[in-house]
Amino acid sequence: MGKGKVDALLGIVFGDEGKGKIVDVFTPRYDIVARFAGGPNAGHTIIFGGKKFVLRSIPSGIFDEGKTNIIGNGCVIAPDLFMQEAKELEQAGYDLKSRLHISRRAHLILPTHRLLDRAYEAAKGKDKVGTTGKGIGPTYSDKASRTGLRVGDILNNFQGKYNMMKARHEQILHDLGFTGYDIRQEERLWMQGIEYMRQFPLTDTEIELGKALKEGKSVLAEGAQGTMLDIDHGTYPFVSSSNTVCGGVCTGLGVAPSSIGEVYGIFKAYSTRVGSGPFPVELLDETGDKIRETGHEYGAVTGRNRRCGWLDLVALRYAIMINGVTQLIMMKSDVLDDFAEIKVCTRYTKDGIVTDEMPYDTEGWNAVYETLPGWQTDLTQMTGESQFPKQLKDYIAFIEQATGTPITIVSVGPDRAQTIER
Ligand code: IMP
């Protein structure tokens, strides 16, 4: 952690790596926690004071009273869902209104964006992305088309702008043959959300961050989703619509590349993916089912079954390169406690070609594995690396060697205490 620096904590595969838990462990070390991309498609699960919270748009630093939290310009925000999420935290006793600053440049997700998300997915048929249905793609599309509504618009002739945008969306929905919806109730709640948001500091967060960094404050940029869901570097078109990689920290918060310090790349000891798209390591057998059941791999936002597979070093190496990862964090190691053998994908193959580099089009590639012995030991009670079984140490060394990057934290269970720093 560097003074006057922004450290990034990034999911480096398909999201759901357990960022929420690690941000919670890291937060005491930072002055500011900031979200830079995505929106309510994320679901960061945090267990705090014995209660489980799922944070969608709000940074995980919110549980720590002394910290400032920022929703940066690169994020998209749904006022109704934000209000729900924030009120739940307020009811649990957390003060938000002075500590949560929202960028005026962040874009608003309208109820009609959510309808468009559904309509576009329906139109795609079997090629659908399998989105979370939160309107993420259509909102970022409007941003890129320069027709979006921003948080700052709340403060200035809002209703007129809203009506115009809604009418445009309704025309598109009509053209797509997507009719028969009734969003009156949703819209009422959404407008209440707009009023509620007015009570928060709606600010120029990039300027605040610039000043804070100059004063030597430390910032943690909390990623959402993962590198393989990045709009540029993920498995396009089966991706989300923002830059989830380290470059997104700079654009999504308005901080300079030279202010980036440590880049923590977080991954699970195995792989998961939600939604459609290529997934060469996918296990469609009882091994995959066992990983899903042991790891409780069901979506935090949609409840969907997550697709499960072995660790993919092709993806990991690619993500380490794109993000400039300086330290790796391996989550959910304990989920592999009960396997006699553990496989690791080191290369992909298709039509007689073998590669260890991420192909442009991951469709149709098969994983090539190396097999390592499992540790078949309960890791969940371990408190230090010295207690690790030899097979786990070998597994860690294998990954470090293959990626050229140290694993500095190993998580062995959901609790904060089950986090072993090396
Ligand atoms: P969208 O972000 O809702 O547009 O969904 C695009 C793709 O990203 C879908 O495959 C989603 O399942 C996936 N996705 C979006 N957010 C998350 C996340 O937080 N964790 C895992 N997958 C996600």
Image: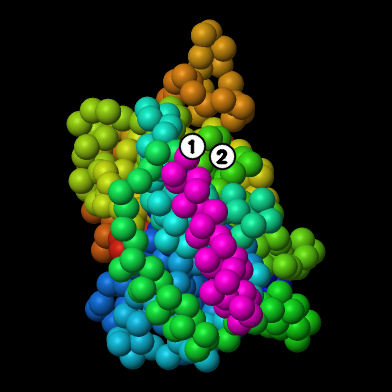
Q: Residue at x 49, y 72 (%)?
A: 59
Query: Residue 171 in magenta?
Result: yes
Residue 118 horizontal/vertical position (percent): 39, 46
Depth order, front residue of 271/415:
271
Q: Residue at x 34, y 61 (%)?
A: 183
Q: Which residue type carries mark 1?
A: Phe
Tag 2 secondary structure: loop
Residue 131 horizontal/vertical position (percent): 41, 45
Mark 2 neighbour class, 10 Å CA radius: few under 14, some 14 to 19, many 20 or more: many
Q: How many marks?
A: 2
Depth order, front residue of 158/404:
158
Q: Which residues are magenta?
A: 149-175
Query: Residue 236 in magenta?
Result: no
When asked about the image quadrant of residue 263, the answer is bottom right
Distance between the alpha carbons at the discs numbered 1 and 2: 8 Å
Residue at mark 1? 238
- Residue that extends furthest to the top in the rendered view of this protein: 352
Q: Is residue 176 above or below residue 59?
A: above
Q: In this rendering, which labeled residue sits more in front, label 1 or label 2?
A: 1
Does residue 87 appear to the left or right of 255 in the view shown?
Answer: left
For residue 277, which numbered disc appears in the image?
A: none
Q: Is residue 156 above or below residue 245?
A: below
Q: Is mark 2 within 8 Å of ligand 1?
A: no
Q: Main secondary structure of the magenta part?
A: helix
Q: Is residue 342 above or below residue 73?
A: above
Q: Which residue type carries mark 2?
A: Gly
